[in-house]
Image (cartoon, helix red, strand yellow):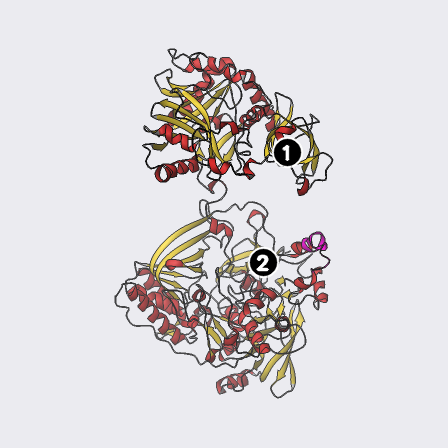
Amino acid sequence: MVSHAQTHRLESGGLIDRSAPLNFRFDGKTFAGFQGDTLASALIANGVKLVGRSFKYHRPRGILTSGSEEPNALVELRTGARREPNTKATTTELYDGLEAASQNRWPSLRHDLMAVNQLFSPIFVAGFYYKTFMWPAKFWEAIYEPAIRRAAGLGRAAGVADPDHYDKAWAHCDVLIAGSGPAGLAAALAAGRCGARVILCEEDFALGGRLLADGGTIDGMPAAEWISRTLAELAMLPDVRIMNRTTLFGVYDGGTYGAIERVNDHLPSPPEHQVRQRLWRIVAKRCVVAAGAIERPIVFAGNDTPGVMMASAMRTYVARYAATPAKRIALFTNNEDGWRTVETALGAGLQIVAVVDARPDVSAAHRALAAKAGFPVLNGSVAGVEGGKDGVRKISISLTSGARAEVEADGLAVSGGWNPAVGLTSYHRGRPKWQDDISAFVPDSAPPGMVAAGAANGAFGLGACMSQGFAAGAAAAQSAGHNGNAGTPPVADDEAFSLTPLWHVAGKGKAFVDYQHDLTASDIELAQREGFESVEHLKRYTTLGMATDQGKTSNVAGLAILAAVSGKSIPETGTTIYRPPYVPVAIGAFAGHHRDENFHATRLTPSHHWAAEQGAVFVDTGLWKRAQWYPRTGEKDWLESVTREVKAVRSGVGFCDVSTLGKIDVHGPDAGAFLDRVYINSFSNLAVGKARYGLMLREDGIVYDDGTTSRLAEDHYFLTTTTAKAGPVMQHLEFCRQVLFPQLDVQLTSVSDQWAQFSIAGPKTRELLREIVDPAEDLSNEAFPFMGAREVSLRGGIRARLFRISFSGEMAFEISVPARCGDALARNLMLAGKQFGVTPYGTEALGVMRIEKGHVAGPELNGTTTAADLGLGKMMSTKKDFIGRVMAGREALAAADRQVVVGIKPTDKKRRLRSGAHVIPKGEIPGSANDQGYVTSVCFSPTLDQWIGLALVERGRERIGEIVHADDPLRGEDYDVELCNPVFYDPDGGRQRG
């Protein structure tokens, strides 16, 4: 469906670019707008009044404001992977091809079946969920929680990965300014002239703040001309930076401020190599908050009807965007500023049908304006609005005299006064103070280095904004050490301002305080009757101010109603604690580039590029990318590839890059004594040229890490750690060296990145090694027995370290070469091993072979097991002391019923095992009372042609051969398994020693 008629667009005026037409879609219908529009202004120009549905009652809602305080006009912006829910139409810059959709409705915006919730409004009062879902208890998980979760939220997330990129950046300045209205521009002008480094942040895409809609005369010239000249001067100042589309959202310690820059949100998608948004950390010596003020609604029946709009917003759409929210307008105001909307509307040729002014006295000038334009001025208040999804139809008025009146209108402008934007000044537990003459909170105890100016400080006159902003900018620059000449401040007149406080008009029908959460005046009164008189309790019980607008339009009215029913003043009632962010910030912006592959640094093994050429599938192992398996043409899945690799190693020869293991050189005359104290077994008696498996304990007696240590010389040991503990073990050893045993003469050097290390395993390992090792090296079993270790020369003269150790259960060597030679070694192993059918294998095949051999690894070294639990208790020396020895002997750690490592295999050989399955005695009911352990590691064993695994089971070694039950509630599986010896393959070790 197409609609190009901008029926509510003025023929002239506004700051839009009529030479740049734009098309956009809302709820599947095509509309037209212009460059310079927001989505909200373009919808208004097209006569669209209904833009959304409320959260709880699904009442029809229209546009209320023109800024980031908007509670109603929340839309889903864009489609597909870039779909973004809860985007404010009032701050969304229009672009060609923009796609938006209303949310929280079904099946359509006009015909929302969920509006039936309005019939249950007597039930859906404040705190109804606390009262309703308490009984019966069993209904909570079965009915209540699923229903609440389905109803929660307003929009739909994309559901797929965000294709855009986000950035994070730092900036430093002397003076940071929030807002580019009259006070903000004046502050920037003064600080910049003084020579300070200035950053000015403005959330709008255009600079000028309220001047863009309200105009005025500054230094004898129209506001638009003054803005242009001021921006030109600021552009000439070398240390002034203006950042539009940027919102300060938080104040943090040390003069650090958070800001979100919407770099490319005004485009369908960011240009190539550009980010969508950028999160700034700005460090400033001083900050001037010139964020203006927010016009507040008055609470009355039907105040959420589409077509009821803030008076300042209505004149913004008319003056800035040349869009008319209504043709026949009524004004409800309690202050002088509301009459500006009347003047703006009349100037645009719109009809004013009535002004309802709650003040006892209306100025003669305004009465003269009314007489000239032919509309009545009624002293009283709006008691109700009749209308619906198509807008306002009739307005009911309670006159001060006690009489009633009605006027017909299609739009109602409301002005209940102005609230200074105290959010930023109230962080760091700052509390604003009440100012009677404007009936609003103003900044009091701002964070260090911050000052407010202009409307943000309660000064609503243009002249006062200019003078306060200029003075604040100059003072901030001087306190930051810049004493240049600020020059003459801009001059403007102050407009008259008077206000009679009015918060709530009693009447029939729902009177909304928090539009987004459907919170009514009666909800606040109910909460007070039920004892929730603290503003913090009120907030949480009623959800006042907890929506995406953070109560910008609702909090003060809610506090005033609470104060009235509590018999207190508003200052006595107080405010809630202010917390950042001031506006919603995408989580992606906080993450920046730290997501997906860039979440952390990536470490590549020395053979990575060669492995990639072989088509390896990689897995993240900490920071490392490790080859998981090497698929070959015709293999249908990973299991087929891994099975092939295991069989190739068992029958021939294969190699695997194990460079990720931690590697530490231990030097010094006391190196052996040092290792004796950190390992449970002895290393000082290890012969040169030999390697030994070792186990470390934590101080509490729990296993910390394992690995092999080789003695290369009398004072030189080379130890390896698990990949996961490479860094932590190095830290642990340094702590031991420097703090626990400083008297020992020993030095530690991490050489993990200096050596490329490969495991070569299989019956043909020696044949392959002889092709790459210098022929003078004797690799026979007699000269190089199991657990031997020494330096060797490779063909070509490269020195390498060779270790006769095996993790696979096969005859195997591990060979280390300088890391720069790792890629070449992998390629040469493939060339030299072609005649032997050499096969590269990945971590999956490595894991299969270690399970077949019964070797423990990370799943068993899980931070809860002891050496005895792992079947390694006999390694614990009784002839020396070592870290963890005493604590390992505690009664609980030596109890006979501890869970220990055993093998496990299904009674049905075709059954697949699953890690995490719980071990239950056969015939018992699964549950914590009968839980005797769990499966830690599983694999399909090509050697045994069935699934096997390792498990931690109570008294497991005493129960070898017992049939137990494996229960996997997560996957809904259960089956019988047999407890068995954890060494499934070559239990006597003959193959690895052969």
Callout 1 secondary element: loop
Q: Which residue is mark 1?
A: 914
Q: Would residue 253 be seen by someone viewing this image from the given angle?
A: yes
Identity, as a three-letter code, of the amino acid under mark 1: Arg
Figure check: 442 above or below 667: below
Rendered residue at 35%/67% (across/down):
187
Labelled pair 2, 1 in contact (Cβ < 8 Å): no
Figure check: 59 above or below 354: above
Magenta stretch, residue numbers: 133-146
Tag nearer the camera, 2 or 1: 1
Q: Residue furthest left?
A: 484
Q: Is residue 449 left or right of residue 399?
A: left
Residue 718 percent coordinates (x, y): 39, 27
Q: Residue furthest bottom?
A: 401
Residue 470 percent coordinates (x, y): 34, 70
Point out the tag, 2 or 1, that comes first from the N-terminus.
2
Disc ID at residue 75: 2
- The image quadrant that residue 380 belongs to is bottom right
Residue 483 percent coordinates (x, y): 25, 66
Callout 2 secondary element: strand
Rendered residue at 61%/35% (across/down):
897
Q: Would residue 229 be seen by someone viewing this image from the given angle?
A: no
Quadrant including the N terminus:
bottom right
Rendered residue at 41%/38% (across/down):
732
Identity, as a three-letter code, of the amino acid under mark 2: Val
Q: Mark 1, residues whose alpha carbon is within 10 Å: few (<14), some, or many (≥20)?
A: many
Q: Mark 2, residues whose alpha carbon is within 10 Å: few (<14), some, or many (≥20)?
A: many
Q: Is residue 435 left or right of residue 966?
A: left
Figure check: 937 above or below 834: below
Residue 231 percent coordinates (x, y): 36, 63
The magenta stretch spans residue 724: no
